[in-house]
């Protein structure tokens, strides 16, 4: 029987990670991410993997989303909204999926003992604190310069994407 402390759920803030990967100059492979965390420790059972992303329109990223689903991810999407940025005087697009991520975290909390959150967004600080109070082990994956100090301080473990690049980088075969 598996130790119940090894039930793992992965939550990927796709938009946040897109910018982190762009900053790093390389992209990770969603398949290799699952494999890495399933095999990082013995007896890990992956119970859920969620991927959240904003879309320009309902057909945007269709092939990528289908590939994620075939790998076992549950994909949550939201249409991008346009916002005016007073400081830059420009419009930008954003799809804030923080609520969806937190809802899924708490909706499935009885199914896992460990969480890996791919995000640097400080808005997750309180959710992470609450999960830790339920004895859930939290790992946050992001990159330097893109992780909020509050989130990094709230987590049990922080992994910089660059530290696991060899294990998760997307490579062309």
Image: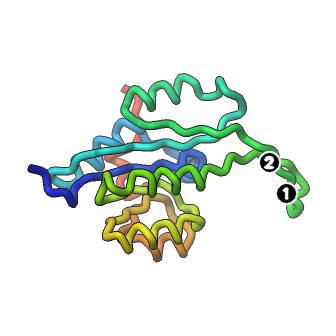
Q: Quadrant of residue 132?
A: bottom left
Q: Name the residue under label 1.
A: 85
42 relative to 111 in the view: left or right: left
| Comes first in the chain, label 1 or label 2 | 1
**Where is residue 17 shown, x and y percent of the image?**
54, 50
Q: Position of residue 26 (x, y in %)?
A: 50, 44
The residue lying toward the viewer, choosing from 90 and 140, is 140
Identify the residue at image location x=42%, y=70%: 155
Instruction: Judge whether residue 19 can be spotted in this image.
Output: no
Mark 1 crowdedness (10 Å alpha carbons): few <14, some 14-19, many ≥20: few
Residue 130 picture quarter: bottom left
Please tell me which residue is depicted at 57% across the width and 62% down the height of the picture: 121
Regarding residue 136, the answer to whether it shows in the image is yes
Q: Is residue 62 left or right of residue 35?
A: right
Which quadrant holds the C terminus?
top left
Q: What element carries label 1?
A: strand
Q: Residue 79's x, y, as percent?
A: 70, 37
Q: Name the residue under label 2.
A: 92
Whether pointer 1 and pointer 2 mark residues with C-beta atoms closer than 8 Å, the reply is yes
For mark 2, does the 10 Å Cα neighbourhood hold few (<14), some (14 to 19), or many (20 or more) residues? few
Q: Position of residue 154 (x, y in %)?
A: 46, 74
Q: Residue at x 21, y 60 (%)?
A: 5
Whether residue 172 is situated above or below residue 98 in the rendered picture: above
Identify the secondary structure beneath mark 2. Answer: strand
Residue at mark 1 to residue at mark 2: CA–CA distance: 7 Å
């Amino acid at each position: 029987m598996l130790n119940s402390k090894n039930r793992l759920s992965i939550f990927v803030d796709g938009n946040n990670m897109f910018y982190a990967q762009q900053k790093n100059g390389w992209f990770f492979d969603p398949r290799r991410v699952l494999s890495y965390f399933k095999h990082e420790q013995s007896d890990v059972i992956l119970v859920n993997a969620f991927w959240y992303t904003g879309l320009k329109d309902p057909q945007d990223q269709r092939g990528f989303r289908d590939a994620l689903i075939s790998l076992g991810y549950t994909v949550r999407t939201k249409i991008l909204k346009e916002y005016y940025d007073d400081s830059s005087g420009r419009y930008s697009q954003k799809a804030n999926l923080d609520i969806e991520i937190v809802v899924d975290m708490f909706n499935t909390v009885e199914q896992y003992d460990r969480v890996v959150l791919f995000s640097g967004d400080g808005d997750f600080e309180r959710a992470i604190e609450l999960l830790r109070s339920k004895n859930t082990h939290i790992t946050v994956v992001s990159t330097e310069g893109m992780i909020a100090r509050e989130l990094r301080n709230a987590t049990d473990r922080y992994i910089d994407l660059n530290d696991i690049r060899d294990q998760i980088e997307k490579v062309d075969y």
